[in-house]
Image: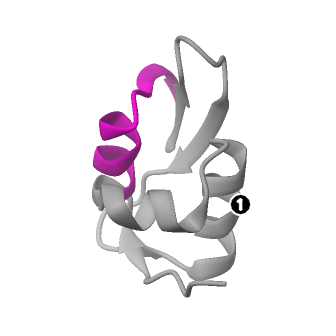
Amino acid sequence: MAKLPSLTSRKVVRALKRAGFVEDRQKGSHLMLIHPETRARTVVPVHPGRTIKEPLLRAIVRDANLSVDEFIALI
């Protein structure tokens, strides 16, 4: 299994948008993204200056129905 790097929320959102996700809504510091075709939904915490660690990033990738390798290619 490939190791995921710690990324900022901005880079995670950019990679998910490249995969076809669009912003659905935001409540506080949590941005919800949805894929219009597959209806996959994922939530990304947006905290400026903080990185998203590997366990949470792995959960975001799993919710987005992407493999780790597919996500790394989108970064």
Pick the front one: 46 or 13: 13
Seen in the picture, residue 52 relative to 43 is either above or below; the reply is below
Which residue was labeled with disc 1?
59
Quadrant, the N terminus:
bottom right
Task: Identify the secondary structure beneath mark 1.
Answer: helix
The reply to whether the magenta stretch includes residue 17 is yes
Mark 1: few, some, or many residues within 10 Å (few <14, many ≥20)? few
Q: Residue at x 53, y 48 (%)?
A: 44
Residue 65, image quadrant: top right
Pick the front one: 33 or 31: 33
Seen in the picture, residue 46 relative to 21 is either above or below; the reply is below
Seen in the picture, residue 26 relative to 45 is either above or below; the reply is above
User: In the current view of this chain or complex, which residue is farthest to the top?
Assistant: 36
Q: Residue 33 at what x, y percent from top left?
A: 52, 29
Q: Residue 57 at what x, y percent from top left?
A: 58, 67
Q: Magenta stretch: give its range.
A: 12-28
Q: Residue 40 at what x, y percent from top left?
A: 67, 27
Q: Residue at x 46, y 59 (%)?
A: 71
